[in-house]
Amino acid sequence: MRRHPAPLTLTTALLLPLALSGCAFGAYFPPTTTLERQISGVYEGVGIGPTGRVPYRLTLGLVERDGRASGSLVNLESRKVYAGSGPFRRLADGTELTLKLYENGAHRANLYLVRHDKDGTVTLDGHLRTVLLGREALGYTLQLRPIPPAQP
């Protein structure tokens, strides 16, 4: 014979939210760290490769606690959008990002960037390698600069 679960009593129903909310009291994290504020944002620049100069826009977000970066890369010429994520690591002179980029669920490219901040000038330098049949094919050298957020 099959047993049915006991219905929630009024007391149990009222105490359940209090019991579950107590799990998060010690787990408060500030919404962004200094590193996240420094790196997260919108960048624009050009890629130079076998097909010439190609303009790109990268929207980048960083979660320091997880050691992950994510974002979307837009080819401003063809309007193709690639979304991806990957790890980052701190270097002595910047931060290294490695993202696998996907278009419609298919792995299309790998993005390798290093963020430099020299004399107040921030750049993301690196390369974009397209993926064809599971192997890196065409390579583009990228240089991106941050775009300041729009003022209201």
Image (cartoon, grey):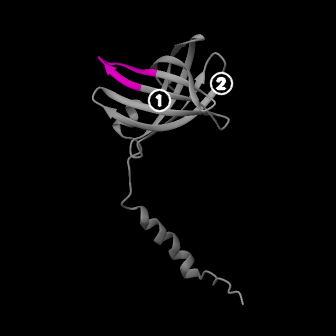
Q: CA distance from mark 1 to mark 2?
A: 19 Å
Secondary structure of the residue carrying numbered label 2? loop
Q: Which residue is mark 2?
A: 80
Residue 77 to residue 86: above or below? above
Which residue is nearer to you in this view: 24 or 48?
A: 48
Residue 142 to residue 3: above or below? above
Q: Residue at x 40, y 42 (%)?
A: 67
Q: Which residue is mark 1?
A: 41
Magenta residues span: 114-126
Residue 62 to residue 118: above or below? below
Q: Is residue 74 visible?
A: yes
Seen in the image, is 79 located left or right of residue 129? right
Q: Nearer the N terminus, badge 1 or badge 2?
A: 1
Q: Is residue 147 visible?
A: no
Residue 16 screen position, x and y as percent = 52, 73
Question: What kind of residue is marked 2?
Answer: Lys
Residue 91 screen position, x and y as percent = 31, 31
In this rendering, which labeled residue sits more in front, label 1 or label 2?
2
Quarter occupied by residue 109: top right
Residue 144: mark: none
* Residue 136 lies in the magenta-colored region: no
Question: What kind of residue is marked 1?
Answer: Gly
Seen in the image, is 57 located left or right of residue 80? left
Task: Specify the principal SS of the magenta part.
Answer: strand
Quarter occupied by residue 33: top left
Secondary structure of the residue carrying numbered label 1? strand
Residue 50 screen position, x and y as percent = 57, 12
